[in-house]
Image (cartoon, rainbow, N blue to C red):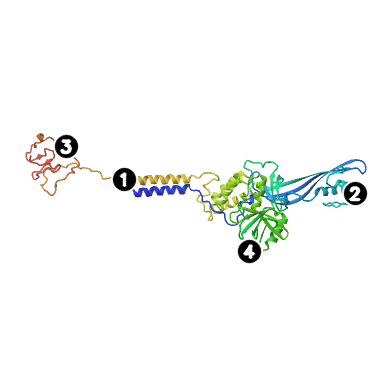
Amino acid sequence: MARLRALASGVAAALVLVAMPVAAHEHPSGITDLVSPAVVRLEAVSHVEITLLDHVGRLKHVERSYDFPFAEGTGTVVNPDGTVVALRRLAVNDDDVAVRAANKIFAEHHDVEIAADDEKHELSDELLDRHLQDCYPPKSDTATCIINVTTEITAFPNVSPASPDGYKLKLAKAGGKADSPAVLVPLDPVTGSVGMPTAPLADKVPDQQGAPTSVAGFLGRPGPKTAHTVEIAHLGEGGTSGDAGRPFADPDKKVNEPVKLGGLADKGMIGAPVIGDKDGHVIGLLVGGGDEARMIGVREITKILTEAGVEPRRGAIDTAFEAALTRYHTSYFTEAAPGFQRVLELYPGNVVAAELLKTSLAKRGGPEDQGTRAAAADPAGSTPLWPFLLAAAILFLAAGGGAYLLWRRRPPEEVTAPPQPLAADAPLDDGAHQTVVVRRSQPFHVAPQQQQQVMTAPDPAIKYCTSCGMKLGPAHRFCGYCGHPIET
């Protein structure tokens, strides 16, 4: 019975192993794949509609529209509907573009030299100068210009083929300084039932000095020749709030990281997510520029999201992508491939998923592949049959083994051999025909005493037992089969 229980336990363990999915592992150090699909290029433009009321000569209305680009940087999608966290400087133009538009339209219409900047200028012609001053904001009763300024923010997602138009955003909430975080929400809902890839936000910033991080962003508008850029960085000593933020510093002092990252910020990575090395979550945003680069922490990001009434959350794309990514980084390439294919079904333009799928297909079934399924026998997205066949074989063997053990342990059957009569010419040998002792637990039917009599054959020398009818020998005093005494 113990062997049967052991066999049953082995079968159960085998079935558990067959049904068990690949164990989840922590993502390798320095991974940015969780965040890079959610990185977007941001371009902000101040659009000015201006009407000049020309009273100098004949009354005439001159209408112009100007676009003044004022910011290029990087944002991070934190919600499947396309909500982006970025910096205030990427959404709010602190320049006085209304003054710039007034200078521009006045110079064009009246053919005078006025610098196309944000400064108010004076003209030598008294009449033209009076009209120019009345064109400048703020608006008054004698204004000669009607000016309307709007801001257009466009996000270009990390997709292939590249989106030529992107999608439009508007400012929902921003801090009071240029490097304060801002929340940008889409003007129109993002198309598609599952939305966009999002980036996970960390709970806090690592405290230790020299903690490794990565910065991911765009140095230009996404396209065939412009992919997202990833740079390694290390956190310096200090806090993450206030004017200074958290500095960067190479613990080995081999690279001047503030200068390196400051240059990247000036080229378009301003506002890029800073990604923690432990689990690949966003721990802050890149700020600064020039020779100085710093980081504002994730708590400032979550604070502005709360004030804007926006909840950062992950979507169906993220769930599928992270599952495939776990298998990829644990070298289960055969299992990762259909996962990335599913991601591309949900979000066809996912650049990172497409690249990892290409690598997974190249490595599946090879020496690096730790998966257990053969690539050729496993169509993408299908359910393999081998676990069920293996389970059926194990159950069959278990049933057969159990039946065999039960058969081996059955009690022996008590078979009574039929009596063999002695041949007439056989020699009388007591040793050759020993008395057989019958177990008393098997009662035999005994005829009533009054019916017991010796039956005689034609040969009076041969006698038979009156109890069981067996042939008796002349040398036997008891019946050799039932043990009944011969003489009654």
The tag earlier along the polypeptide, 4 or 1, is 4
Mark 1 residue element: helix
Toward which corner of the image does residue 268 lie, by quadrant? bottom right
State if disc 2 and disc 3 touch (CB < 8 Å): no
Mark 3 residue element: loop
Give the residue number, with chain letter if any, for mark 4.
251
In the rendered image, the residue lying farthest to the left is 460
Give the residue number, with chain letter if any, for mark 2.
129
Give the residue number, with chain letter if any, for mark 3.
445
**How many residues crowd around disc 2 within 10 Å: few (fewer than 14), some, or many (20 or more)?**
some
Which numbered mark, 3 or 2, is in the foreground of this view?
Answer: 2
The tag earlier along the polypeptide, 4 or 2, is 2
Distance from the alpha carbon under mark 2 to that under mark 1: 116 Å
Indicate the amino acid at tag 4. Answer: Pro
**Residue 455 in picture, x, y percent from top left:** 9, 36
**How many residues crowd around disc 4 within 10 Å: few (fewer than 14), some, or many (20 or more)?**
some
The residue shown at (12%, 35%) is 448
**Left or right: 96, with 389 as reference point:** right
Distance from the alpha carbon under mark 4 to that under mark 1: 73 Å
Quarter that holds the C terminus = top left
State if disc 1 and disc 4 touch (CB < 8 Å): no
**How many residues crowd around disc 1 within 10 Å: few (fewer than 14), some, or many (20 or more)?**
few
The tag earlier along the polypeptide, 2 or 1, is 2
Indicate the amino acid at tag 3. Answer: His
Indicate the amino acid at tag 1. Answer: Trp
Give the residue number, with chain letter if any, for mark 1.
407
**Residue 386 in picture, x, y percent from top left:** 47, 46
The residue shown at (32%, 45%) is 406
**Residue 6 in picture, x, y percent from top left:** 37, 50
Distance from the alpha carbon under mark 3 to that under mark 1: 33 Å
The tag earlier along the polypeptide, 4 or 3, is 4
Mark 2 residue element: helix
